[in-house]
Amino acid sequence: MAMVDAMPVPDSRQKVDELFLFWLSEPSTQEMLRNELTKVCRYGNDGVSGGGESPSILDSLVGPSAVTTSVPRSSSPNNSNYRTPSPPLHLSNSPKSPRAKRRAKSPRRSLKYGASSSAATEKTGPSTAFDDTDYFPTPSTSEPDARKTEKAGAPGRADTSAILKDTEQQKARRARSAKSAKLTRSEVIPRFFFPNGRAGEAREESIDGQLEAAANVFQEQPNGEVTMADFHLIVKAMGLPLYWKATLFSACQDGDPTPTDTAATVSLPGLRKTWQRVTRHCHDEPARFVKLMATEGRSYLTESDFELLMQDIVDTHPGLAFLATAPEFHARYIETVISRIFYSVDRSWNNRITVSDLRRSNFLQILRSLEEESDINAVTDYFSYEHFYVIYCKFWELDTDHDLVIGEQDLSRHADHALTPLVIQRIMSGIVTRDKTVPAGKLSYKDFIWFLLSEEDKTTQRSIEYWFRCLDVDGDGVLSLYELQLFYEEVLQRLRELSIECLSVENTVCQVLDMVNPRLKNCISLGDLKACKLTPAFLNTFINVEKYLEFEQRDPVTMARDDVETLCSEWDRYAADQYEILLAEEAGENDTSNADDETGDSDFGEEEKEMLALL
């Protein structure tokens, strides 16, 4: 026992250091470390290629002078700022050094991604026996000499700071390279957004040609000036729509919105200055129209901006010549047309029409077609007088006190009480009304126009948005099963009062869900309704009892034939039918006019009779 206790015990830490230094002195190990460090320097933590380190830095890391390099004291685990780097993925399968087995117990750490020599692996083979000659260094590379070599050639604190400084410089170079590459890409990618149209040499030549043509007309006029009565010659010579003339004439008169002076004139310099101002930054027709119409430098149009345009149409269009003897109807017709324009063109529900809205609509094309169509009723979009007559008569029938405002009780009489009370409450709640001048719970004539257009034609995008707002009680953007049940229960009650057999709430909800096929289960969004072809039937199920029964009792063959043969919209069909009915009622009124005058009882008011007489 004494002999055993007296045997010398080797220092385990010194042996591990000797084994590691021997492994690091192998040429194959140095070659492998050089390759791996090159990859680490080239692909840093940011994942961007930095072009690699300079050879001098790599030589300082794994050169001949770094054979016995050890980790500085500042990189020991006891240092609070020390963080062990994680090995790259491509080193995970390389053989480990002899020191790796005892790394967990050792208080000191070396390079974590060090690997054993492939030559040593081939030399030892698969055998696991310990061989001193394979692991211990030769006497020429003893520990004191190795430490001298470390002091002489190993990178210390100064060398480490130099490497970090060089790394920061390379990061700065990479940042400058990325910035220059970004600038190059921005120059290569062409501009693709033109809010005011695309400019070009052809458009500049067109503007010069327009002004030259206008100059020829001015030369033919006395004193080289043109009045409002002859300004249509200037507009036609410039190739502009005819009914831009009042707005352009007003712009040439320093923006006077109501040029009532018939003696006012416009000269060529004034026209040139105005048109160059309009076309300087506006390169297509919608942008120029907004620039010309908008007042106070706005980039959008409001309802008041259309009044001058509409008054010129009423005064000069041949299809509205009969209104010359009834100026009291001018305001109602203009108000109706402007409301229809905003109903179809304004896509944001904010009473503003932008250049983008005009590009997506057909308003400018319809406005240009007015100069070619003498029959105003043939232009069913926006300007038809027959459509105005139907809308105004329907409102006049509900407005019993003729104060141009109707309440819930008045609106409930529409279409023979076809609307449910909950639907009427939602309409009057202000969720779909735009006129803020009327009291709460009332509907003005402007808002009634939107209601009637949405009620009679549920295929348009605006009507779907209109009724979706009414059905979305909680305003969360989707129609839940609770909301569908809430509206259908009132329809169900009305059907029971009429002794009509109907489906239960559960069956109806399942039927409409199959009809719409929403993307989210048990929730119907606005996009689902716009994508569905049976949206009118869906909306009538919860809004209009009469149309719901008509759909349930329809003949599929007849409905399919009508859809194929009909080219007009639902609103055009409704307006044409109602106009014929009103004319027939007027004919009956004429037959009994004497009796009505004596008793004072008539279905139509004096204003309606005058409107019918004009037609």
Image: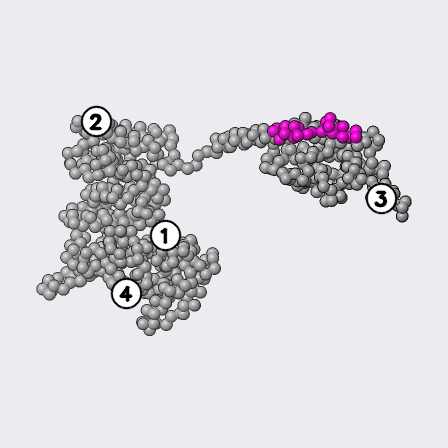
Q: Determine the CA span between mark 1 and mark 3.
A: 84 Å
**Residue contact at pointers 2 and 1, CB within 8 angstroms:** no
Residue located beneath label 4 in the image: 417
For disc 3, the neighbor class at 10 Å (few under 14, some 14 to 19, many from 20) is few
Point out the frontmost of discs 1 and 3.
Answer: 3
Provide the major secondary structure of the magenta segment.
helix
Marker disc for residue 127: none
- Numbered mark located on residue 461 in the image: 1
What are the residue bounds of the magenta stretch?
A: 144-166
As shown in the figure, which amino acid type bears the numbered disc 2? Gln
SS at badge 1: helix
Q: Relative to residue 439, is residue 229 depicted above or below?
A: above
Q: Position of residue 245 (x, y in %)?
A: 24, 37
- Please name which of the two marks, 3 or 2, marks the residue nearer to the observer: 3
Mark 2 vs mark 1: which is more N-terminal? Answer: 2
Q: Residues within 10 Å of mark 2 (few under 14, many from 20)?
A: few
Mark 2 lies on a secondary structure that is helix
Assess whether mark 1 and mark 4 are in contact (beta carbons under 8 angstroms): no
Q: Which residue is mark 2?
A: 219
Is residue 553 at all visible to an observer of this figure? no
Q: Residue at x 20, y 42 (%)?
A: 316
Give the image location of residue 480, x and y in percent. Answer: 42, 60
Spatial CA span between label 4 and label 1: 26 Å
Residue drawn at (64%, 33%) of the image = 42
Query: Can you tell which quarter of the image residue 451 is in?
Result: bottom left
Q: Which mark is residue 129?
A: 3
